[in-house]
């Protein structure tokens, strides 16, 4: 990485951080979280990188919010990040920072240099999908803390508020954290036909097994290949918001991008409408099932 000191000053006041749907009056004890489908790239950020926007979008959860549009139309509550994952990754702990990315990382700062940081995909990504250095120089630690405050915290604070509303109204809440996964990974892991849907429940720790089983059954009934906790068992959102003693459950939904998108050209594929209908129908059925548990 170049030792140039980068000065990035995003215009946060002009930035739309998130979108929310059906949040005024929750109809179900289910909150949909879509943290990785944002397509807004702050120009000040792009200018500081070695990558172009299409390259950075290769780590994006393509069109996941649109796959869930039918569920939103049916009244389900959804929170979606509008800012790109390449700028801030919401599915990481704020402490998952790689100190080698900064020219002024505080020596006394607590460090969580875990597997994500070592892979270059902490809360602030060090690399792009080609495993090339993302930034053209070293970052300012203070700027990144401002980035976390103005983007990361806004999303997570709102998600917690919606969980609290659901708890008060229904007595329990399930957060369904919605993502997509590269088809290549799915095919490598399962060389028979590939994994279509992955449900990550921290190996049955983040929600009652019958909740996971119910959603899996909706996909099985439509001939999708569903796996639990493979290739993903759940990341920060699944782990952080899971509070069984407070009746808060979490579940991570991963959808194989190859089912509905052209991953190379970042556009919808021929199967998009059918997959969107199936995904929304499955999630709506889950919401209705949860509502009957009150």
Image: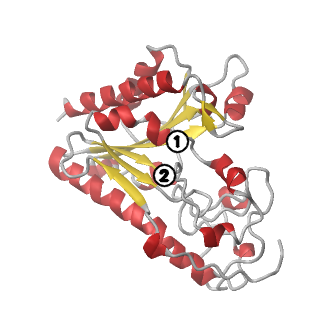
Q: Please tell me which residue is depicted at 29% across the width and 50% down the height of the picture.
A: 245
Local crowd at mark 1 within 10 Å, few (<14), some, or many (≥20)? many
**In the rendered picture of this protein, how many numbered marks are placed on residues?**
2
Q: Nearer the viewer, residue 47 or 100?
A: 47
Relative depth, front residue between 75 and 200: 75
Residue 203 left/right relative to 133 = left
Mark 2 neighbour density, 10 Å: few (under 14) some (14–19) many (20 or more)? many
Left or right placement of residue 165 versus residue 45 in this view: left
Observer-nearest residue: 212 or 264?
264
Q: CA distance from mark 2 to mark 1?
A: 8 Å
Is 16 drawn above or below residue 197 in the view shown? below
Along the viewing direction, whichever of 124 and 95 lies nearer the viewer:
124
Sequence-wise, the earlier of marks 2 and 1 is: 2
Q: Which residue is mark 1?
A: 179
Residue drawn at 64 percent across, 40 percent down: 266
Q: How is the image coloured?
A: secondary structure
SS for tag 2?
loop
Q: Position of residue 118 (x, y in %)?
A: 73, 60
Residue at image coords 34%, 52%: 20
Residue 171 at least partly seen: yes
Establish if 280 lies above or below 124.
above
Location of the C terminus (image quadrant): top left
Image-based side of 76 in relation to 38, left or right: left
Classify the position of the N terminus by image quarter. Answer: bottom right
């Amino acid at each position: 990485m170049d030792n140039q000191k980068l000065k990035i000053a995003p215009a946060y006041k002009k930035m739309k951080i998130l979108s929310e749907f059906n949040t005024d009056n929750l109809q179900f004890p289910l909150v949909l979280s879509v943290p990785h489908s944002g397509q807004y790239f702050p120009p000040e950020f792009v200018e500081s990188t070695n990558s172009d926007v299409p390259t950075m979008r290769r780590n994006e959860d393509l069109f996941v919010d649109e796959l869930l549009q039918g569920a939103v139309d049916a009244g389900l509550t959804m929170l979606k990040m509008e800012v790109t994952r390449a700028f801030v990754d919401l599915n990481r702990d704020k402490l998952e920072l790689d100190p080698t990315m900064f020219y002024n990382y505080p020596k006394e700062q607590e460090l969580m240099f875990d597997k994500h940081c070592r892979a270059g995909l902490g809360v602030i990504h060090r690399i792009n999908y080609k495993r090339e250095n993302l930034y053209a120089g070293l970052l300012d630690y203070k700027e990144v803390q401002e980035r976390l405050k103005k983007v990361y915290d806004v999303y997570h604070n709102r998600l917690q508020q919606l969980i609290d509303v659901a708890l008060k109204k229904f007595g329990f809440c399930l957060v369904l954290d919605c993502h997509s996964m590269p088809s290549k990974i799915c095919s490598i892991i399962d060389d028979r036909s590939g994994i279509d849907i992955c449900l990550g429940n921290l190996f049955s720790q983040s929600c009652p097994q019958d909740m996971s089983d119910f959603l899996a059954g909706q996909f099985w009934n439509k001939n999708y290949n569903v796996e639990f906790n493979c290739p993903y068992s759940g990341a920060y959102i699944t782990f952080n918001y899971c509070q069984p003693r407070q009746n808060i459950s979490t579940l991570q939904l991963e959808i194989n991008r190859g089912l509905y998108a052209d991953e190379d050209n970042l556009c919808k594929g021929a199967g998009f409408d059918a997959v969107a209908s199936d995904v929304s129908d499955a999630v709506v059925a889950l919401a209705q099932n949860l509502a009957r548990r009150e």
